Image (cartoon, helix red, strand yellow):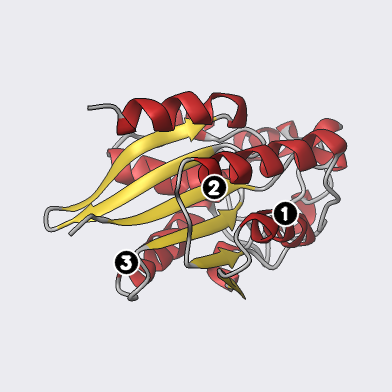
Amino acid sequence: MPPKRILLLKHGETLENARGIHQGRGIGGTLSDQGTKDVDLAAGTLSANGISPEAILRSPMSRCRQSAALVRAHFPHATVHEDDRLAAKDSGHLSGLPRHAAADEAAREGVPIHQLRAPGGESSEDVQARYISLCHAVFATPARTTVLLGHGGGFACLLLWLTGIGWDSYLDHVPASGALSLIEQSHAGPSLALINVRPAELGDALSARAAP
């Protein structure tokens, strides 16, 4: 039997992304034209290559709700559910500030940035824990192929866990707009088949996997 699959699909670029703003949970975000094109291309490429998810789980943020609607247009029979474990990082007062604000605050506090927790918010380690929990839960369901439509930071945290790479490589694992990773589950456990493939390169990546 083929392995179960989880597709990690990052929401499309937002107008706030384009301005260098950290959104977190405080800003829902609106997809830019480029972000809309990226997600639509990624979903269309999956469909063209015979990959049809049975379920789509999305973050509650508006940027993911908009992205999920684009994906669902290609897979009308897939169920769509909101899951809070896919939510963006709760960055507290850092939401809405330039992206470098978190690094600046971590330096002032004298803590590693992945352990920085704004008052009332959460750290990247907290985000990693809930993304890992969701991954395990999804593989326990009957669905053979599931799309998780979430955030770059959360997916980077999950990829670090899957690869066993340290937090110093976090930024190298943040996916671009509409980029996709593929996790396959076998008796040996989860493994990464694709990592952060951009929409324009996805067709070639999938064709290469299908080649004998």
Q: Which residue is pictured at 45% across the width and 55% down the height?
A: 128
Q: Identity of the amino acid at label 3? A: Phe
Indicate left or right for 152 with 39 as reference.
left
- Mark 3 burial class by Cα count in 10 Å: few <14, some 14-19, many 20+: many
Q: Nearer the viewer, residue 16 or 73?
A: 73
User: Which residue lies under the disc numbered 3?
Assistant: 139
In the depicted structure, whether residue 44 falls above or below residue 200:
below
- Mark 1 burial class by Cα count in 10 Å: few <14, some 14-19, many 20+: many
User: Which residue lies under the disc numbered 1?
Assistant: 70
Which image quadrant is residue 123 in? bottom right
Q: Are marks 3 and 1 in contact (CB under 8 Å)?
A: no
Tell me which label, 3 or 2, sits earlier in the chain: 2
Local SS, label 3: helix
Q: Are marks 2 and 1 in contact (CB under 8 Å)?
A: no
User: Which residue lies under the disc numbered 2?
Assistant: 47
Position in image of residue 196 (x %, y %):
49, 33
In the depicted structure, whether residue 149 falls above or below residue 211:
below
Q: How many callouts does the rendering have?
A: 3
Position in image of residue 121 (x %, y %):
65, 63
Frontmost of labels 2 and 1 is: 2
Local SS, label 2: helix
Position in image of residue 40 (x %, y %):
70, 43
Q: Nearer the viewer, residue 9 or 74?
A: 74
